[in-house]
Image (spheres, helix red, strand yellow):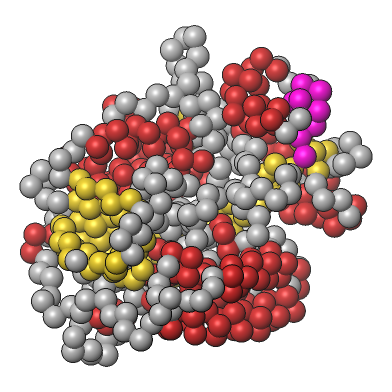
Amino acid sequence: MRFDTDFLVIGSGLAGLAYALKVANKLPDAKVTIVTKADEGESNTRYAQGGIAVMLDKDEDSFKKHIQDTLIAGDGLCDKDVVKMVVKKGPKRFREITGWGAEFDKQSSGDYDLGREGGHSVNRIVHHKDITGLEMSRTLLKQVHNMPNIEILDYHFAIDLITEHHFKEKLPVKPEYVHCYGAYVLNQKTNQIERILSRITLLASGGTGHVYRSTTNPLVATGDGIAMAYRAKAYIQNMEFIQFHPTSLYNPGASPSFLISEAVRGFGGKLRTKSGEPFMHKYDEREELASRDIVARAIDSELKISGDEYVYLDCRHLDMEGFKQHFPTIYEKCASLGINVENDMIPVVPAAHYLCGGINVDKSGKTNVGNLYACGECSNTGLHGANRLASNSLLEALVYAHKCFKDGIKNYASIEIPAEINEWNAEGTSEPKEKIVITHMRKELQTLMSDLVGIVRSNERLRLAKEKLHFIYKETKKLYDNSTLSPQLCELRNLVTIAYLIIEQSTQRKENRGGYFNKDLE
């Protein structure tokens, strides 16, 4: 079956929904198609607890302070011009989403109740309790459903971007001359692979957390967009900078890991060893409010010293009524596991949380591949550098969704889709006799990455990881070439690509910066 559209959006998180809504409003005669591999509301956005960093308090805050905090967190690798642009455009984009109906917590005075998180010098985090992302996602989905020219195709798995490599007459194409004309998509309801042709394609496919064994990301975060872009010859950068959230709830066997928001430490939560001793003062003068890379490495160091499996986050001294008001979901989750936050400390461990690199884009969100844009966590804008400042991700998603929208509508009508594009060819493939091999390879890959390419790395670990990954790659390729495609197999293929990019770009890094730490480079 063949679909045609003007704008194809891959992903239904904040970035993809904001972009689709803007395009549909501006161009009522254009067709916008959103494809998402699970339910339309399932994305990393949905699980963003803390909030969105934005300069609203002109008495205590300033653009200069927000810019400086972002640059410090990025450890010298941020693009300063991008940082300035995102921070200064932030308030306008924030007012836009409140205009669409998103609600954020306010004080009795009517001013926004601004929280504080690690790396921020002042309170500037706007939030909706501890479910900010869910509130923003809910708001945008409601708006999107009111637009007659937007179609959402849920349970549609994007397999590969359509480029010149898929023309009937195959021609050698240099990366700088590749163009995107849509995507091949697996309709999970019919098990058919459909060719969706589009003038403009936006990748807003989220992160890569499930390349690791323990992650706060939902199950959909398998790096699909980045892997597709890499195969289409897009430039990928800074994949070595994985941000491990310092405080995921220690609950063995749970996947994904439940996030204990950074805002809890901003609220006054203290980290302690299993024996009850505070330790952050040994690592940074900001203690619990140091940036995530420092806190995560501190916890990792303490666990290696003690041999314990977790540390504690102590909230017993806090205003408990205020805690319940700000973090109801966290309070209830802990209670469901028998942890009474008023009397018990919360066991926490670091978990893979956010990718600071991704698909290279310019200030308009354009990749080096023609007609292809990217925004949100799958993109490398230059905002985060070596380490993301807490709650800058939702801000970046809104600002870059707008930049992609403004640039994409300029010349979309003049883009012609070639007629000589192949339909998907599944000849020679068959249904695998059993899928346990796919499951086994995925677990093996996650174990490899967690043990050898985690918070602290070494030259020997990276060498070993590369060797082990090659075997998994060969077995996965054999499966892919001979099997009828399934979401599980496609995800494994993409995770192998993501692992390769992280390992390869880690070996090229010659100094420790932000979220990247190799003990041989000390």
Which quadrant of the rendered structure holds the N terminus?
Answer: bottom left
Which residue appears at 64% of the width and 74% of the height? 510
The picture places residue 229, in percent across and down from the top left corner, at 37, 70
Which residue appears at 36% of the width and 54% of the height? 155
Which residue appears at 64% of the width and 27% of the height? 332
Horizontal side, residue 181 vs residue 278: left or right: left
Q: Is residue 267 visible?
A: no
Q: Quadrant of residue 270?
A: top right
Q: Quadrant of residue 444?
A: bottom right
Nearer the observer, 288 or 463: 463
**What range of the chain is rendered magenta?**
340-347
Q: Can you say whether 463 is above or below 408 in the image?
A: below
Which residue appears at 25% of the width and 39% of the height? 144
Which quadrant of the rendered structure holds the C terminus?
Answer: bottom right
Q: Is residue 312 visible?
A: yes
Horizontal side, residue 193 vs residue 13: left or right: left
Nearer the observer, 305 or 125: 305
Looking at the image, the residue that sits furthest to the front is: 433
Q: Quadrant of residue 265?
A: top right
